[in-house]
Amino acid sequence: MKVLEAQFVKDFTKMCHDGYMQGWHEGNGGNISYRMRESEVENVREELNESGEWKEIGGPVPGLANEYFVMTGSGKFLRNVELDFADTCCIVKVNEDGTKYKVVWGLVNGGRPTSELPAHLMNLESLKARDPELRIVYHCHSPKVTALTFVLPMDEVIWTRELWEMVSECSIFFPQGVGLVEWMMPGSYEISKASAEIMKTKNVVIWVHHGMFACGHTFDETFGLMHIVEKAASILVDVISMGGVKRQAISVENFRAIEKVFGVHFDEKYLYERKSNKVGEY
Ligand code: 2HA
Ligand code: ZN
């Protein structure tokens, strides 16, 4: 089978398109990775060229040794993925000790995998250890979440509770809450390591003054999660713009009822009785 005929390419392309339509991928902003199933690798094996040279990943991922990944390319516009997948994306293979990668398909006009390659692979390694079917990592430049990183305190408990209060479904879609990474250099080992640490337990990582990472089992689930968090952030920005004081909100009692009805579990740290009805305070 040709790579371009594979279902994962269609799903990957749709996510690039949908994210662009949301306004999350200005210029070359954002990137996506997908850890392929063995059967998917075998199905396209005839098109893979393993003769390329190994390059340093920039962060070891022994848990992903010998695996294959679909990725966007560095400097490529996600807008253009649906126009020319083979120019904008690639398949990379990780070597046997998880320190190097090589491009085995794609980037036909040259280039490298995403500048966030270490973050993607290190996140995917955390996810594989948690649940082998968590195969997708999505990074976008989500404007409302980023706006909030200038005004909310650097406190994951406050962030989680504020976002959960914005839409009833939020706590069900990200019951583990969100993680925060303070400003660090994009593409660096440090920001990748901090993200991968959070992805050991959470599905949403916020890069302060930059954007967001979300993960999932399917492209729809991953995109939906990103969309839900950004929607909640958008409502929170509106609430802050209207003065930032809530007259009423989803209560601790309500969250406990959600836990029962939907069979989810929330860490008690998020279920504090609020002393303040102002956004960003306990
Ligand atoms: O430009 O989003 O974080 C790609 C990025 C870097
Ligand atoms: Zn980015």
Image (cartoon, rainbow, N blue to C red):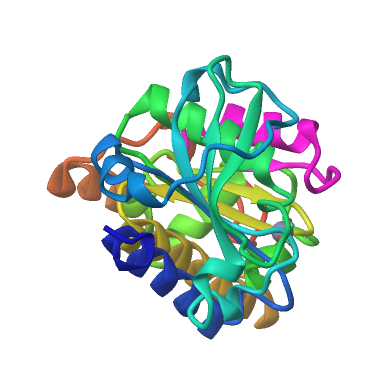
Screen quadrant of the N terminus: bottom left
Q: Is residue 71 above or below residue 195?
A: below
Residue 49 shown left or right of residue 153 in the figure: left
Exactly how many numbered labels are in the figure? 0
Q: Percent from the top left, x then y, of residue 153?
A: 74, 49
Query: Which quadrant does ligand 2 occupy?
Result: bottom right
Q: At 69% from the left edge and 81% from the top edge, which residue is drawn?
A: 241
**Residue numbers of the magenta segment:** 180-202
Residue 259 shown left or right of residue 58 in the figure: left
The answer to whether one can see residue 139 in this image is: no
Q: At 48% from the left edge and 25% from the top edge, which residue is drawn?
A: 64
The answer to whether one can see residue 118 in this image is: yes
**Nearer the observer, 84 or 72:** 84
Q: At 33% from the left edge and 59% from the top edge, which residue is drawn?
A: 8
**Nearer the observer, 11 or 113:** 113
Residue 201 shown left or right of residue 185 in the figure: left
